[in-house]
Amino acid sequence: MMEFIEQIRAIVGEKGVLTGDDVRSRPSTYWNHQPMQAAAIVRPASVAEVSACMRQCHEHGITVVPLGGNTGLVEGTACEPDQIMLSLERMNTIEQVDEVSRTVVVQAGTILQTVQAKVSEHQLMLPVDLGARGSCTIGGMIATNAGGFGVLRYGMMRERVLGLEAVLADGTVVSSMNGYLKNNTGYDLKQLFIGSEGTLGVVTRAVLRLEEHQTAETTALIALHSYSQVTQLLKHLDRALSGSLSAFEVMWGDFFALNTGEHSKLESPFAASYPFYVLVECQGNQADELRQRFELALEHAFENALLEDAVIAQSAGERASLWAIREISEPEERFFEITIGFDVSLSIADMDSYVSKVQGGLAQLASDATLLVFGHLADGNLHLTVGLHTPVDREAIEHLIYEGLKEYGGAISAEHGVGLEKKAYLAISRQPAELALMRQIKATLDPQNRLNPGKIFD
Ligand code: FAD
Ligand code: ZN
């Protein structure tokens, strides 16, 4: 291995290789804070260097784990001592912002927030946004097909990628850096790499589709007494707001109560408690018109018994406070000894029934367990957190959550991916023929199984 690392050093230079304490001082993954195990972190500075490193690894039978900001939530960056981490952190240049075509060309190691800030100088926006914006990279977001807030209106990362460049396991550079929305010239190869969690190629650059910057937004927190109100309200607002609805984030009562209760610094703006709350936001460019339309839509919703109570943010500070109720994680960290998080997809109509069944099953597994439910309801995406005061059999809880999805045809991962964490359950969401085709694609692109092996499936 030492000799091999010296060969890599000859490609990427002194700054391009970290070993020893420089590796071990980093955490293994987002959840696992044990020291990182890799033989080295290799940090190429160009696609040519990535290609040369991959070729070298291919020839010497060395396994590679691609690394972005290490904010992935499914152990996709877990690495063994005889493997190397290939970090894109030195490939962090924003190469071009095109105001007319509304695109940005960016290297894969660039942090999301840096891209957001840069394009806003051009009155444009990259509308994929998530809590990890300060450390996740464009390459990692492409590799996981990240979602987050705003998917309802702007789509996931897949909808943002017009073109990309990737390096295969043998060092071949596949460049599909077209900036066109329409390009039906054979197979759309870039799609192979989006959401492939570093198992098919190393993403090195991308052309991303931007939107005109939206200068105004209106935000409300809404209280509801039934799930049918929640689903009717979504349809009503989507119609009434003519495409400007950009967030519809649901919170079940227990989640809201914890985040606004005695373990939290936040308070509920409502005097009473309700079983459901929704954080709604719309974006546009005419602040007054947007506000009027929003208020009218809420008034109609109230008159038609689609909501019980609502508060509209009157300032940026109030907006931030409402969003904080949805995003804060300290209360659950403070209140529970153990938390286990899930990220599932199922049709909106089935969510309430699914959650009730999980609640029932959980009460039988662990009497002191609490189920906290929230998520991007309009995207068919729920996040469930099981909060516990005493240890229980984790597998039994995973079984409950994932097996419960079967009768609804749900997906075990909505936006976080599979990584190591969910691979045992992949067959719940995928047919045997789909899994066989996935394996065939992997074998074609990476016949020696050198790129992030064991992630998604064995
Ligand atoms: P990493 O964690 O470094 O890597 C993730 C995976 O991609 C790994 O399998 C890795 O091998 C691979 N990879 C990384 N870079 C490359 C590359 N250049 N080429 C090929 N493969 C690569 N996700 C959502 O979808 N929606 C959310 O709302 C959301 N919120 C989050 C909030 C927080 C606080 C955190 C910590 C995470 C959140 N995530 C969310 C998880 C999300 O997957 C990541 O934040 C992000 O997409 C991963 O980017 P990263 O650069 O950190 O990738
Ligand atoms: Zn999410």
Image: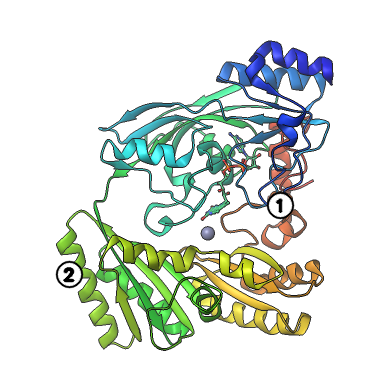
Q: Nearer the viewer, residue 260 or 98?
A: 260
Mark carried by residue 415: none
Which of the image's four quarters has the N terminus?
top right
Q: Which residue type carries mark 1? A: Ala
Viewport quadrant of the C terminus: top right
**Residue furthest to the top:** 10
Q: What residue is drawn where x is 36% and y is 68%?
A: 280
**Residue 451 seen:** yes
Q: Quadrant of residue 346?
A: bottom right
Left or right of 45? Residue 20 is right
* Circle 1 crowding by C-alpha within 10 Å: few under 14, some 14–19, many from 20: few
Residue drawn 41% across the image and 83% down it: 224
Amino acid at dot 2:
Gln
Q: Look at the image and tell me whether residue 409 can be seen.
A: no
Mark 1 to mark 2 CA distance (whole Å): 51 Å
Q: Nearer the viewer, mark 1 or mark 2?
A: 2
Q: Position of residue 168 (x, y in %)?
A: 65, 27
From the top left corner, tell me how far across and down residue 57 is, in percent: 75, 22
Against 57, is 398 above or below? below
**Observer-nearest residue: 451 or 43?**
43
Q: Vertically, is 108 above or below 303?
A: above
Q: Earlier in the sequence, mark 1 or mark 2?
A: 2
Q: Secondary structure at mark 1?
A: helix
Q: Which mark is residue 433?
A: 1
Q: Residue at 50% x, 38% y: name it.
A: 138
Q: Residue 171 or 335: which is nearer the viewer?
A: 335
Residue where numbered disc 2 is placed: 292
Q: Residue 256: x, y in percent? A: 50, 76
* Horizontal side of residue 56 vs 295, given as left or right: right
Instruction: Return the x and y of residue 314 as percentages of the image width and height.
Output: 25, 68
